[in-house]
Amino acid sequence: METIRSLMTLAAFATFLGIVWWAYAPARKSRFDDQARSILEESDE
């Protein structure tokens, strides 16, 4: 039972690291910057 718990913890941590890597990858910086600017440029009309 302890082995399963350890594997689940490791899998959750690996998933977390994957999401962090995906969010902060240099290839996505321009896309996220464009989306952030578009929110400020939208009008409420």
Image (cartoon, helix red, strand yellow):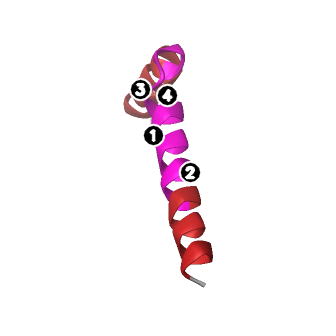
Alpha carbon distance from label 4 to label 2: 25 Å
Q: Position of residue 36 (x, y in %)?
A: 41, 29
Give the amino acid at mark 1: Val
Give the amino acid at mark 4: Gln
Q: Nearer the viewer, mark 2 or mark 3?
A: 2
Q: Is residue 26 magenta?
A: yes
Q: Main secondary structure of the magenta part?
A: helix
Mark 3 Cα shell of 10 Å, populated few (<14), some (14-19), many (≥20): few
44 on left or right of 1: left
Dot 4: what SS? helix
Q: Name the residue carrying label 4.
A: 35
The answer to the question of whether label 4 and label 1 lie on touching residues, with beta carbons closer than 8 A, is: no
Q: Name the residue carrying label 1.
A: 20
Q: Which mark, by number, is residue 5?
A: none
Alpha carbon distance from label 4 to label 3: 10 Å
Q: Position of residue 38 (x, y in %)?
A: 47, 26
Q: Earlier in the sequence, mark 2 or mark 1?
A: 2
Q: Earlier in the sequence, mark 2 or mark 3?
A: 2
Q: Nearer the viewer, mark 2 or mark 1?
A: 2
Question: Is residue 42 at all visible to an observer of this figure?
Answer: no
Q: Earlier in the sequence, mark 1 or mark 3?
A: 1
Q: Residue furthest left?
A: 40
Give the amino acid at mark 3: Glu
| Residue at screen point 48% across, 55% down | 13
Q: Position of residue 45 (x, y in %)?
A: 51, 40
Q: Name the residue carrying label 2.
A: 15
Q: Which mark, by number, is residue 41?
A: 3
Q: Position of residue 2 (x, y in %)?
A: 54, 80
Magenta range = 12-28
Q: Earlier in the sequence, mark 4 or mark 1?
A: 1
Alpha carbon distance from label 2 to label 1: 9 Å
